[in-house]
Structure formats: structure tokens, C-alpha cells
Image (cartoon, grey):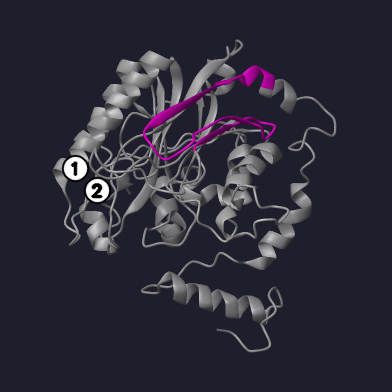
């Protein structure tokens, strides 16, 4: 057991995240927010990121320190100049590789949540009087040889209001589901889908492509999330990207499917979706990355309120009206997509499908997927191609 375990349970509709021994700031909505929440400004911020590993995979501490300072200054500037009360930064805004790294190399360049980097950012949130969402690459002492892609919600009191570790997308990172029994023992069930109840509304966090899976955002919504903030680092080059479509195809000018997915997540969960994508990478005279998905602020009807035009350094802002959202969520009728959910009808199929068997010890993701495919074919969930399984 860890020296300090902090898991708060706030009824069936709320959850709390573990802040790795740091102050955890969360309280029940019914106690903390009895009055109306006034509309306020939220921002998604793209900052320049210096690579924090060398071409040989060695960590570059001075680059990490520079990125931390860039984000800290952006927090204070955006809150001060734009009046933003909630700020979302991109995935890899603090640590960014330019070459493929081994898990050991990732871990060597990871940060501890009790270290000076997060302390500096907590100070910036305190000085700005704002909530801040960002993504550090984290090392956890209880899981040596592993690294986690973490989503933090920093509070205007200088604490950590929420800690989430990325659950979806198969890369070299460790997901809590990869070490689930030990993870539950250490941090509890509520650490998987944490939702922080704040004076700005109930906030959940995702990292990277998490929101491409509807179950991820739905779990946050069912735990009360009204705002889902995503730290993203994704190009617009996907199988559905406009560049890969015929010039006169009916969908030639539609955005890539991951961009449409975040708008659909907002609509089906009646939640605000705030997505901050990666800004320019490299030195100050370097060019922004091409063909990046836009940063976006999407309202609870799926309408885009603000979007970035390129991958340069910028901040987009929009007004969030939580009281209007709550009225919409609590109004019966066909427009209330969330209210029409019949989760009990779908639960048996999810339980029977068993897509999510954890990897065996020393088994990589590809091996685990092949094993799952064979199992799903044997049980009739998937049909194998006539040519046989690859």
C-alpha cells in the first residue's frame, strides 16, 4: 500500500482522482456550488515545445525546464490577458520526443508529480487564479520500468484537483488496465475515470485519442462530467483525412473522423469538449507542424464555438454557460440525447464480448491483440476472413 492513499467517493454520480500524495481538492457539488455558475471564459492553448530527448534518446533536462516555463508563462498570460478561468494545454506540452523511444528511455525523461516541474505549474495556476489541464509524462515509483501519459487538473488554490492516466491507444506507455489488479489495490476504482467537482462545473480529462472511443467519454459523463478536457497531439493525417479523399467525393471537405468524433462525443453526452492540440515543435525559428487537427471548443450540442486555424502558438477562447447546459440536460424531450440512454440493454453485450483481457506477463500489445482476436473468433464475436487470420 502507498504511504498516502486518497480516494474520495462522492455518491454514485461523482468520482475523484488520486494526486499521488499531493493536496486533493474536490468536494461534492451539492455542498460547494449551491448557487448558479456564471458564464466564464475557457481557453485551449497551443505552445511551442522543445524536444526533451536527444536523437540518441537521452533526456534533455534544460529543454524540459524551458517547456515548463513556457507553459507557466502561458497560464498567467492567457488568464490575465484573455480572462480565462479554465485553460487546457496539449499532450506532450512538457516532454516531447522526436525519435522512437523505449519504455526505459521514456521513463528516464518522465517527471514525478511531487517534483519541481509540477510545483512550478501549480504556482502558475495559483498566480493566475485559474484551473489548468495539462499532460506530463509521469513515472510512478510503484511501477518501475514503466511510464504513464497523465492528465492533470491544477486548481487556482495551487493544488491538484484531478489526476488521470491515459487508458486508450496502444503505444509503449502503461495503461492502468495493463496492471489493473495492482492499480486498483493502490489507487482504487475511482482513479480510472476521475471527475473533479469545481466551481466551474464538473470536469473530466482525457489524453490523446481517448475520446475516439465513445465508452471513455460516456464513463466520465455517467460520473457527472459536464466538461471533458482533452490534451491532444494528433496530425490530421488519418484514413479519413481530407487529403486522402477524391476531390469531388461527397465528404471531400469534411474534417477527419477523429475531429468529427469529438463533436459527436459532445452531442451524445451533452458535454462541453475542450481539445488542445500540439503547437509548434523545436526552436523559436522552426516552422509549425503541418496538417494538425485543430484545437477546438465544442458546446454540449456539438457546435464548434472556437477552433485554431493552424499549429502555431495561439490560444482560442469561448464562453462556457454551465447553467444553460444543466437546464438542457434536465429538460425532457427528443433533444436530450443523454437522457435517452438505455445502458441496461447494452450491459450484457459488453460483459459477454470481453474485448479487454489484460496482457499476460511479458506479452506486448501486438501479441495480446492476436490472442484476443483468436478468442473473439472462437466465440463468434468476430468472423475471420476466408484467407485466415493474419
Q: Quadrant of residue 386?
A: bottom right
Give the residue number, with chain letter if any, for mark 2: 51
Residue at screen point 50% across, 51% down: 236
Farthest bottom residue? 387
Q: Which mark is residue 338?
A: none
Q: Which residues are magenta?
A: 295-324
Q: Quadrant of residue 120?
A: top left
Q: Position of residue 221 (x, y in %)?
A: 62, 38
**In front: 386, or 156?**
386
354 shown above or below 200: below
Q: What secondary structure is marked by label 2?
A: loop
**In front: 272, or 123?**
272
130 shown above or below 66: above
Give the residue number, with chain letter if any, for mark 1: 63
Q: Position of residue 172 (x, y in %)?
A: 36, 62
Q: Position of residue 40 (x, y in %)?
A: 53, 16
Amino acid at each position: 500500500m502507498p504511504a498516502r492513499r486518497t480516494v474520495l467517493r462522492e455518491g454514485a454520480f461523482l468520482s475523484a482522482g488520486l494526486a499521488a500524495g499531493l493536496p486533493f481538492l474536490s468536494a461534492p457539488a451539492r455542498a460547494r456550488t449551491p448557487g448558479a455558475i456564471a458564464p466564464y471564459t475557457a481557453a485551449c492553448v497551443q505552445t511551442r515545445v522543445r524536444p526533451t530527448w536527444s536523437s540518441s534518446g537521452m533526456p534533455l533536462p534544460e529543454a524540459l525546464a524551458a517547456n515548463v516555463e513556457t507553459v507557466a508563462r502561458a497560464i498567467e498570460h492567457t488568464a490575465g490577458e484573455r480572462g480565462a478561468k479554465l485553460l487546457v494545454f496539449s499532450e506532450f506540452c512538457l516532454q516531447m520526443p522526436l525519435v522512437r523511444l523505449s519504455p526505459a528511455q521514456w521513463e528516464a525523461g518522465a517527471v514525478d508529480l511531487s517534483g519541481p516541474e509540477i510545483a512550478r505549474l501549480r504556482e502558475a495556476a495559483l498566480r493566475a487564479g485559474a484551473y489548468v489541464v495539462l499532460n506530463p509524462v509521469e513515472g510512478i515509483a510503484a511501477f518501475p520500468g514503466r511510464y504513464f501519459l497523465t492528465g492533470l487538473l491544477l486548481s487556482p488554490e495551487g493544488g491538484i484537483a484531478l489526476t488521470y492516466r491515459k487508458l486508450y491507444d496502444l503505444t509503449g506507455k502503461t495503461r492502468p488496465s495493463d496492471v489493473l489488479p495492482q492499480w486498483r489495490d493502490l489507487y482504487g476504482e475511482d482513479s480510472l475515470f476521475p471527475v473533479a467537482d469545481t466551481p466551474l462545473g464538473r470536469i473530466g480529462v482525457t489524453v490523446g485519442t481517448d475520446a475516439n472511443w465513445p465508452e471513455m467519454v460516456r464513463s466520465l459523463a455517467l460520473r457527472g462530467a459536464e466538461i471533458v478536457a482533452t490534451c491532444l497531439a494528433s496530425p490530421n493525417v488519418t484514413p479519413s483525412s481530407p487529403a486522402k479523399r477524391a476531390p469531388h467525393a461527397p465528404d471531400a471537405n469534411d474534417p477527419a473522423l477523429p475531429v468529427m468524433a469529438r463533436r459527436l462525443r459532445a452531442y451524445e453526452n451533452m458535454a462541453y469538449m475542450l481539445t488542445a492540440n500540439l503547437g509548434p515543435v523545436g526552436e523559436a525559428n522552426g516552422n509549425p507542424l503541418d496538417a494538425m487537427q485543430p484545437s477546438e471548443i465544442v458546446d454540449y450540442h456539438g457546435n464548434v464555438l472556437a477552433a485554431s486555424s493552424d499549429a502555431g502558438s495561439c490560444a482560442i477562447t469561448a464562453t462556457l454557460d454551465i447553467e444553460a447546459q444543466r437546464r438542457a440536460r434536465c429538460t425532457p424531450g427528443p433533444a436530450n440525447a443523454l437522457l435517452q440512454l438505455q445502458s441496461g440493454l447494452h450491459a450484457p453485450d459488453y460483459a459477454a464480448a470481453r474485448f479487454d483481457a489484460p496482457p499476460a506477463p511479458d506479452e506486448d500489445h501486438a501479441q495480446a491483440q492476436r490472442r484476443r482476436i483468436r478468442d473473439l473468433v472462437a466465440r463468434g464475436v468476430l468472423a475471420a476472413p476466408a484467407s485466415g487470420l493474419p
